[in-house]
């Protein structure tokens, strides 16, 4: 062994010791960051409040609902590769995480404040713009925070961290949803009620960001040289060619993500049969959020024991069955049961899709892999709601659900038949 090889192994050993020494501290910091920080973001991404708010402001336009959420997805699509380019050459990424996290939370606050000061038409435009900006920051944060977690949490602990973190975050999210729907929005939905709920969500997410002051971030033994964004984009085909399992995964994830086109229309379809008062909205959102919350503990255990691939397969099947069952639901009880299934499956699929990316390939290319997976997924995530809005306007909600199921089946089949469990191939 050469002196250079010995030095590299020694540096890698020091890196691993640092991670183990600070694991409890970093685990706890990430846990409470997720508990508070995800509250507002789940509130915005839940298929209940925002679609209902947009529908109210637009005078009942399904197309506007789809357009607004499509622009949010477009924002998420644009920035991941930019974010990867910002952090790939840095030994510490926590400072950038604070900047993007602060900007993202500012969007939530402005959504709340806009309701107090703007008239309906201006408010609708502002909300669409803020959702787009939120998506831009969300695309950056998805890369930075996922990469940060991969640096401080070993692969064998990530399932339980994400499961427990999302469990605690779900409790606060469900509480905000219930309070917002029952007490702030009320039976007669109002702009002021929605605005106060946004403000409450902002306060909780700001508390979550503060938890990251406790994180001790290690400096890896080596990082990639800084390159231009253009050069990084040129390197993408080479990466995809040399990592076929990862290439197939992002394809399957993108196909399945098209199934999310139905998300904003679940609650609107339910509203046709059971009504959509603030109390009903809060109750359904509570069921949706709590199901995802409790199931996170299960997904975490399965992931640590059998890998995130199995989590993706199980949750996809539940998602498909829940979507089909929604079309047969005619009562509040049945609708709640359906949203329990959707909440558990969507949350589990999100955990699996984001976490399994960390297990492909080497550490040096991890930021670009995270960014690439998120970008490709968000392309379909952006197109999905827009296509869903057009289908809903022309053919009705049932057509949106059926097309969604077809995409989910295709993506799930590809994961089952074409993508091996990455932990049996390599360990990060």
Image (cartoon, rainbow, N blue to C red):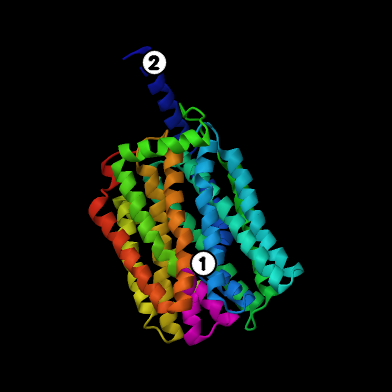
Q: Nearer the viewer, residue 415 or 235?
A: 235
Q: Nearer the viewer, residue 68 or 320?
A: 68
Secondary structure of the residue carrying numbered label 1: loop
- Which residue in the rendered view is the most extreme toward the top? 3
Q: Which residue is mark 1?
A: 46
Q: Position of residue 148 (x, y in %)?
A: 50, 41
| N-term-proximal mark, 2 vs 1 | 2
Q: For the C terminus, which image quadrant?
A: top left
Q: Which residue is mark 2?
A: 4
| Gap between marks 2 and 1 measured at Cα | 51 Å
Please tell me which residue is depicted at 53% across the width and 32% down the height of the picture: 90
Which residues fall within the magenta stretch? 263-285
Task: Tell me if residue 57 is in the magenta stretch.
Answer: no
Q: Position of residue 81 (x, y in %)?
A: 49, 43
Please tell me which residue is depicted at 36% across the width and 60% down the height of the picture: 256
- Which residue in the rendered view is the most extreme toward the right? 117
Horizontally, residue 118 falls left or right of residue 181, namely right
Q: Is residue 412 above or below residue 269?
A: above
Residue 245 is labelled as none
- Which residue in the rendered view is the most extreme toward the front? 394
């Amino acid at each position: 062994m050469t002196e250079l090889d010995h030095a590299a192994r020694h540096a890698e050993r020091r890196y691993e010791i640092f991670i183990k020494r600070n694991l409890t501290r970093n685990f706890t910091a990430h846990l409470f960051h997720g508990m508070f920080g995800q509250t507002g973001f789940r509130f915005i991404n839940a298929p209940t409040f925002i679609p209902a708010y947009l529908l109210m402001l637009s005078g009942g336009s399904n197309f506007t609902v789809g357009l607004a959420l499509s622009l949010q997805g477009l924002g998420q699509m644009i920035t991941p590769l930019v974010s990867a380019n910002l952090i790939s050459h840095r030994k510490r990424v926590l400072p950038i995480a604070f900047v993007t996290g602060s900007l993202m939370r500012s969007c939530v606050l402005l959504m709340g404040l806009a309701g107090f000061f703007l008239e309906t038409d201006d408010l609708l435009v502002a909300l669409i713009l803020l959702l787009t900006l939120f998506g831009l920051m969300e695309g950056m944060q998805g890369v930075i925070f996922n990469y940060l977690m991969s640096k401080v949490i070993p692969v064998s602990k990530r399932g339980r961290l994400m499961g427990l973190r999302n469990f605690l975050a779900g409790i606060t999210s469900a509480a905000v949803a219930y309070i917002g729907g029952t007490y702030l929005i009320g039976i007669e939905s109002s702009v002021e009620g929605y605005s106060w709920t946004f403000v409450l969500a902002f306060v909780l997410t700001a508390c979550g960001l503060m938890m990251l002051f406790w994180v001790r971030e290690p400096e890896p033994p080596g990082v990639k040289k800084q390159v231009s964004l253009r050069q990084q984009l040129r390197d993408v085909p080479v990466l995809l060619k040399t990592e076929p399992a990862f290439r197939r995964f992002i394809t399957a994830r993108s196909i399945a993500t098209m199934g999310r086109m139905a998300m904003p229309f679940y609650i609107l379809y339910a509203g046709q049969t059971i009504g959509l008062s603030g109390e009903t909205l809060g109750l359904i959102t509570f069921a949706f959020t709590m199901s995802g919350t409790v199931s996170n503990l299960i997904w975490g255990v399965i992931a640590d024991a059998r890998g995130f691939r199995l989590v993706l397969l199980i949750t996809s099947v539940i998602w498909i069955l829940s979507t089909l069952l929604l079309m047969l639901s005619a009562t509040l009880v049945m609708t709640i049961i359906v949203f329990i299934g959707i909440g558990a499956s969507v949350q589990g699929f999100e955990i699996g899709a984001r976490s399994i990316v960390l297990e492909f390939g080497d550490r040096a290319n991890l930021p670009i892999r995270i960014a690439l997976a998120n970008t490709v997924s968000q392309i379909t995530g952006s197109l999905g709601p827009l296509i869903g809005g057009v289908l809903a306007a022309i053919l009705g909600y049932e057509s949106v659900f059926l097309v969604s199921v077809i995409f989910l089946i295709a993506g799930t089949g590809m994961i089952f038949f074409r993508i091996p469990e990455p932990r049996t191939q390599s360990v990060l």
